Image (tube, grey):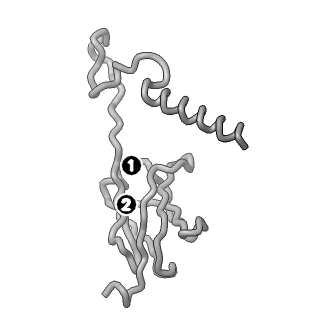
Amino acid sequence: MKKLILSLVFLLVGMAAWAQHGSCGNHSNYNNNQPSSNATPGTSTIAKITKVDYVVYPNPANQYFQLNEEAVTKGFAREIRIFSSTGQEVASFAIAKGEVYDVSALPSGIFVVRLLDYKNEVVESLMLFKTDAAIQN
């Protein structure tokens, strides 16, 4: 057990150091979408990736929820998975522009909404508060 804890500590310290200093090499060419001083005119540069802020609304929800349209259009999330407070997956949906996601069958409570990309990697996790219609009015 001691070895496992020490291994995890060393792994976390190593990851923190890697994140602070970058992975490998000099990344100065990627700042602010500007080409480096030795870039050839007319060549493309790597675009700056901006984080998309997903919003679940209405929250609390009683019958349905939606995702903000800008995030759906610009973001990389392709699937919604909803988990109960015990970690059980209770619903899933394909993400589509303008879509309304029905949660009327879920009981009242707090749920974790995970947005996944096409590789099933988590793009973002959000909280969804589900209420009964009688409580919300």
Near-viewer residue (101 or 8): 8
As displayed, is residue 65 above or below residue 30? below
Quadrant where the image shows the C terminus: bottom left
Binning the other alpha carbons within 10 Å of mark 2 as few (below 14), some (14 to 19) or many (20 upward) gives few
**Tag 1: amino acid:** Gly
Residue 128 position in % (x across, y down) = 42, 68
Query: Of marks 2 and 1, which one's residue comes earlier in the chain?
Result: 1
Where is 20 relative to 58, above or below?
Answer: above
The residue shown at (47%, 80%) is 108
- Give me the C-alpha separation between circle 2 and circle 1: 11 Å
Task: Provide the residue designation for mark 1.
Answer: 75
Against 62, residue 24 (above or below) is above
Between marks 2 and 1 in the image, the one whose residue lies nearer the viewer: 1
Q: Which residue is mark 2?
A: 97
Would you call the spot at circle 1 few (<14 residues within 10 Å), some (14-19), or many (20 or more)?
some
Residue visible at 52% across and 66% down? 82
Q: Nearer the viewer, residue 115 or 134?
A: 134
Asked whether, in this view, residue 112 is left or right of residue 65, the answer is right
Element marked by disc 1: loop
| Position above or below: 9 against 70 | above
Residues at marks 2 and 1 touching, judged by CB atoms closer than 8 Å: no
At 27% from the left edge and 11% from the top edge, which residue is drawn? 37
| Secondary structure type for disc 2 | loop
Quadrant (top left/top right/bottom left/bottom right) for the N terminus: top right
Disc 2 marks a residue whose amino acid type is Lys
Between 132 and 4, the one lying in front of the other is 4
Please name the residue shown 65% across and 41% down the image. 5
Q: Position of residue 53 (x, y in %)?
A: 33, 52
Residue 65 position within the rendered picture, expressed as x and y whole percent measured from the top left: 39, 71
